Image (cartoon, rainbow, N blue to C red):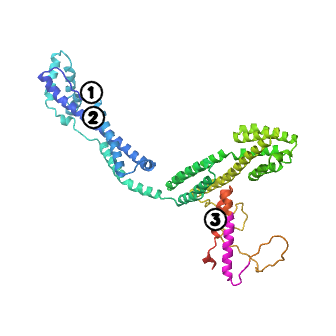
Amino acid sequence: MSETMTFSNSPKNETILQPLNTVYRRQRIQKIIEATAWGFLLSSVTAILVLFIFLFTGLSNLFDFSGQGLVLLIFFVVLIGFCFGAVVGFFLPIDRHESARQADQYYHFKDRLLTATKLLSRSETTLMERLQLEDAACCAGTIDPQLVVPYKLPSRFFVALIATGISLVTGFVSPYFVQQHHAVAAVRLPEIINAAETLQNELVEKIEELSEQNPEEKNLRELSGELQKLVSKLDQSATDTKEALSTLSEMEEAIRSVLSEFQIETFDASMKEVAEAMSVAEATQAISQALKEEKYTKAAEELKKFDAQSMQTMSKQERNAIGDQMRKTLDNMDQRNQKTLQKTTQKLADAFEHNDGEKVQEGTDEFAAECNKQAIRKEISNSLEGKLALLGLCKSECNGNGGQSGNSNNGGNNTNKSDSADKNWGTGAAGNPASGEATHLDSQREQKNVTGIIGQGESEYEKFNTNEAPQEKTVREQRESFQEYHKIAETVLESEPIPLGQRQMIRRYFESIRPNDEEIK
């Protein structure tokens, strides 16, 4: 803060104060220079830290990375420190007698000027004090403020300048290398691309088919739309394994949500309770058995066969027993939130108890519809369970190991032959039969055609064309066998929740034994 020493206006006083005020102003400017150097140094160090954080902590991934942008950021940080130091230096307090003390020290005036500044503040002075002021005025006339307070740039200013230059150059050049790294990291991973294609064909399209076949299941249509969006998101995140795995987890959650809405297990439990109620009468035994075995399509057929005439074959005790047992299941259905099934069961119970043939026909038809609906949902559920297994397989592939690992202790993926016992099971060799060392069979082999005697029962036979070449016959047989068993395997993989390791082993196996005419010939 700029200030000057003001005392009584006399020629003698002005002679003393004018050079001291000039010294004071130069002191203030030098203080600003020193404070600015400190701010410059601290801001340059901060700029280097910002550069390090930006380049090596992944912060560049959150922003549009460019050399000019980073240079501007560094320049902005340095400018803030520079200006902050200047402002602090401007407002730092300076003793008003410091200029006199510094002039006395430089010219070896033995505190003449410092004493004079103190005497000038008095209203009255003695003869000796006036003589001291006259002597100080003579000394003040010889002062050169530029010599007393020369302007100097502190060494830290040059250190800060070098640090700033390094950070600016590094900031301008480093984006090129970071962009090269990003370009490598941004390569679309083939395993994620393959997973997206597989899920589009085997997940989204299959669920769309299910929703078209079962239009009453609106949640399937919603699931199909959601999975389509997630597959698109998976394809877009083909450069990031973690994001891809997160998307696959979202798909699994969406499918599990639909499965939970179906309430397959709780419906099965309610159906079994109704089956127990119907098991007390001979006329309803077929219905009861089908429900117990969860053969709902068959149960629906048996229910439609049951009519008023069938009910007349039952005794009153049997009808009352069935009605009473059915009523006991209503509370459980209410707790399971199965309102429609509860209403249908109650209608059947009333019909049996009141021997109402018309209501029993309505009740069995409605119950048959519930059975058909449960049969369809179980088929859908089994298919969705298979899709969950497919998602798990895709997760394994997106992890980059394809279900395999280089470690020989992770389930026996090593295909090398070993003559010693091992606890690991050989999924590597089993799923990849073309690899590994061939087994030596120390035996004499002989090919024979075995004939038999035709007896009773069904038989299978194949007619061969004698003009067909042996090699062509072999190729045809292998191709037909492959197609038959591959179709069976795909059907099982589609409909049953097989463990991931086994699913992958089966697929790799059939891929490895696919007939190749060129190799056979």
The magenta stretch spans which residues?
Answer: 463-488
Residue plotted at (67% across, 76% down): 476
Q: Is residue 487 magenta?
A: yes
Image spot of residue 394 (x, y percent): 59, 57
Image spot of residue 386 (x, y percent): 65, 55
Q: Which residue is mark 2?
A: 31
Q: Is residue 175 magenta?
A: no
What amino acid is found at the position of numbered circle 2 in the picture? Answer: Lys
Mark 3 Cα shell of 10 Å, populated few (<14), some (14-19), many (≥20): some
Say which label, 1 or 2, has the lower sequence index.
Answer: 2
> Which of the labelled discs sits on residue 508, or is there none?
3
- Do the residues bearing badges 3 and 1 touch, measured as CB atoms within 8 Å? no
Say which label, 3 or 1, has the lower sequence index.
Answer: 1
Q: Quadrant of residue 49?
A: top left
Nearer the observer, 109 or 16: 16
Is residue 412 at least partly visible in the picture?
Answer: no
Mark 3 vs mark 2: give the one in front. 3
Q: Which residue is mark 1?
A: 95
Q: Residue furthest left?
A: 11
